[in-house]
Image: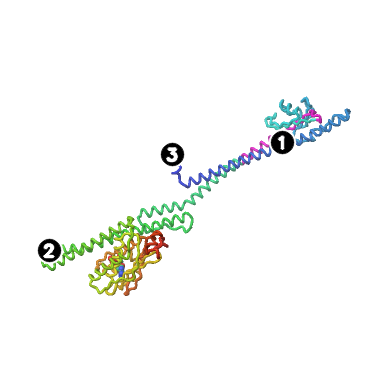
């Protein structure tokens, strides 16, 4: 646990370097062991082959002499000098079957090669042995004891060939020193280069951290971290961070604007109420007509406040992600209801506006009836508000899994540049006019939310001075089961359950 924390608290730079050096060290150790081991084995094999070759040649010579003597007992037992078989660093010795020395190479002088009991026994059985013994000068020596056997299987002599292992030992020591020094040097180099590489690779992360800290301390979401201009991990990290900053900046600004807008919206009716109360207090409104006018003002301002608060509450719930009801709603019936209400509104507006029903298909959607009615009423209310004279037409089309609710007017229209902002909270093309007409600037934001909560979207077409058309696209309720469909008219051209493509956002 403690070790894990210590490791986790270690800078990544150090961790990377340690891993790098550790792996290299393990590889080097393995490689060195293999190298030293295989060189040692190869040198020993080479030595054994050398000793065996000398022993074989001496043995062959002994056999020739032996056979000659067997053919003719008078033949003298003459062996060539043993130096002829080896080299100055190879000692050769020939012993009689009883173990006594017969001949030795000149480089042995008066010394003899050690013949152990075990080696003698093996030789007597016709088997060669290879031993390593301590030499008289302290070094090591490899001795091959090689029996010479005649054709009846009897030992006729024992050849002993020896060579000092000093050279092999010296070479091995040299190799191990080189490998050790080389390894340590390589590890030191890896440590320095690894630390430098890790430092270089991670330096941009430090820069990003510093920049992020500077931005957060200065609370300046306007600032961005300088992009390194690469598409590597760091480049992507910086882009992601900047994107997040931009998003935070947007949210922060939206929030500030929203609070400012709400305060502004509240101030207008409150100022008006305050002014009316002042007049009442000062007794200026003794005249019954003026008083009734004041009461009307109070009523309408309170109604406006109520509407504003209700709209805000609704949007707050929407922001919280409150789910909507999903019950079958007959849109044609709903449209008829709204049409009747629209007629009353148009009449009450006192303007020469004719409300009529256009095309009307039958359509069933899954959703919240009250919310859908509110959506239509908001659109119809706007159509009447922003039309001086002419007509407002309500239509309902059903095609290909979707339903289109269309509210068309012949009003003042909307400038093209305003259309992308239309659904933003508190956005108005003409602030003074909207307020004068009792608008809060939240109507279309609510329309968009209701449409999207039903899996749909809203589109707008408008020409200034000619009129506007708002179309709400909603997915039809899923097709009923085939047996029900056969009974009902929905079977003729049933709606499709799937919705293709994401609704475009305005
Ligand atoms: P408001 O309460 O101001 O009507 P909305 O969100 O309903 O707020 O509408 C936003 C703005 O869009 C309005 O202020 C108005 O400028 C414009 N608008 C909406 N509907 C229409 C329409 N049918 N004709 C012309 N302009 C419209």
Residue 33 percent location from the top left of the image: 61, 40
Estimate the spatial distance between the alpha carbons at disc 1 and disc 2, rounded to whole Å.
129 Å
Left-right relation of 89 to 405: right
User: Label for residue 2?
Assistant: 3
Q: Nearer the viewer, mark 1 or mark 2?
A: 2
Can you see residue 8?
yes
Q: Magenta residues?
A: 150-178
Which residue bears the numbered disc 1?
48
Mark 2 lies on a secondary structure that is loop
Q: Mark 1 vs mark 2: which is more N-terminal?
A: 1
Mark 3 lies on a secondary structure that is helix
Q: Quadrant of residue 372?
A: bottom left
Where is 364 relative to 182, above or below?
Answer: below
How many numbered discs sit on the rendered protein? 3
Quadrant for the N terminus in the image: top left
Beta carbon at label 1 within 8 Å of ligand 1: no
Q: Quick one: 149 or 463, which is closer to the camera?
A: 463
Which residue bears the numbered disc 2?
282
């Amino acid at each position: 646990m403690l070790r894990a924390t210590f490791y986790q608290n270690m800078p990544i730079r150090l961790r990377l370097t340690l891993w790098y050096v550790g792996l290299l060290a393990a590889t080097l150790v393995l490689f060195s062991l293999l190298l030293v081991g295989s060189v040692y084995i190869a040198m020993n094999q080479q030595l054994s082959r050398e000793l065996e070759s000398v022993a074989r040649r001496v043995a062959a010579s002994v056999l020739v002499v032996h056979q000659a003597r067997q053919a003719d007992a008078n033949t003298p037992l003459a062996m060539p000098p043993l130096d002829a078989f080896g080299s100055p660093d190879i000692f050769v010795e020939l012993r009689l079957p009883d173990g006594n020395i017969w001949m030795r190479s000149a480089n042995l002088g008066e010394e003899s090669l050690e013949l152990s009991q075990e080696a003698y026994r093996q030789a007597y059985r016709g088997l060669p042995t290879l031993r390593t013994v301590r030499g008289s000068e302290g070094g090591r020596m490899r001795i091959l004891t090689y029996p010479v056997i005649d054709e009846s299987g009897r030992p006729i002599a024992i050849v002993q060939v020896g060579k000092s292992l000093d050279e092999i030992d010296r070479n091995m020591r040299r190799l191990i020193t080189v490998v050790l020094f080389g390894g340590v040097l390589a590890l030191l180099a890896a440590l320095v280069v690894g630390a430098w590489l890790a430092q270089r690779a991670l330096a941009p992360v430090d820069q990003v951290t510093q920049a992020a800290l500077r931005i957060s301390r200065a609370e300046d979401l306007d600032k961005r971290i300088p992009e390194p201009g690469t598409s590597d991990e760091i480049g992507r990290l910086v882009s992601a961070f900047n994107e997040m900053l931009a998003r935070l900046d947007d949210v922060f600004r939206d929030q500030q604007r929203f609070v400012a807008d709400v305060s502004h919206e509240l101030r207008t009716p409150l100022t008006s109420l305050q002014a009316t109360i002042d007049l009442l207090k000062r007794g200026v409104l003794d005249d019954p007509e003026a008083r009734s006018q004041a009461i009307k003002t109070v009523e309408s301002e309170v109604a406006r406040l109520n509407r504003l608060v209700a709209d805000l509450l609704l949007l707050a719930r929407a922001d919280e992600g409150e789910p909507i009801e999903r019950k079958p709603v007959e849109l044609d019936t709903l449209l008829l209801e709204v049409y009747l209400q629209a007629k009353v509104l148009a009449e009450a507006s006192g303007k020469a506006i004719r409300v009529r029903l256009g095309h009307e298909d039958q359509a069933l959607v899954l959703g919240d009836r009250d919310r859908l009615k509110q959506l239509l009423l908001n659109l119809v209310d706007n159509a009447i508000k922003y039309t001086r004279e002419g007509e407002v037409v309500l239509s309902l089309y059903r095609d290909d899994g979707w339903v289109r609710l269309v509210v068309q007017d012949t009003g003042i229209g909307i400038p093209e540049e305003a259309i992308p902002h239309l659904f933003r909270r508190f956005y108005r093309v003409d602030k003074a006019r909207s307020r004068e007409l009792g608008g809060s600037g939240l109507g279309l934001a609510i329309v968009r939310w209701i449409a999207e909560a039903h899996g749909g979207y809203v589109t707008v077409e408008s020409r200034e001075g000619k009129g506007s058309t708002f179309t709400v696209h909603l997915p039809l309720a899923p097709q009923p089961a085939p047996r029900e469909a056969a009974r009902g008219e929905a079977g003729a051209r049933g709606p499709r359950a799937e919705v293709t493509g994401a609704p475009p956002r305005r």
